[in-house]
Amino acid sequence: YNQRIDQSQVQALGRSEDDAVGNSLGVHQKLVEGIESLLGWRKRVHRKKTETRWKIIGGSRKAC
């Protein structure tokens, strides 16, 4: 079995591989952005909960 590949087929193969790699990198970048966004959201929620606790504790101490 001997098959001959011409230059246009080689270029087409190269493009599809580049597209696949480019797509993988794009997907990876989107995942990283999403994870970073979630981590930032989690930090903001934690900060807000801490502030709320301090307000409650501060209010209860004033009432005593």
Image (spheres, rainbow, N blue to C red):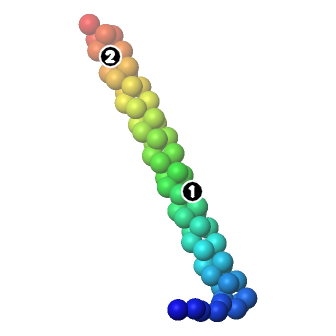
Can you say whether 31 is above or below 50 in the image?
A: below
In-image side of 63 versus 42 (left or right): left
In-image side of 55 versus 35 (left or right): left
Query: Mark 1 vs mark 2: which is more N-terminal?
Result: 1
Residue type at numbered disc 1: Gln
In-image side of 20 versus 49 (left or right): right
Farthest residue in the left direction?
64
Q: Which residue in the structure is indicated by mark 1?
A: 29
Looking at the image, which residue is at 45% across and 46% down?
38
Estimate the x, y position of residue 40 in percent, counting from the top left: 49, 40
Residue 37 seen by the camera: no
Please tell me the numbered disc located at residue 57. Answer: 2
Residue 8 seen by the camera: yes
Please tell me the numbered disc located at residue 20. Answer: none
Residue type at numbered disc 2: Ile
Quarter of the rendering containing residue 24: bottom right
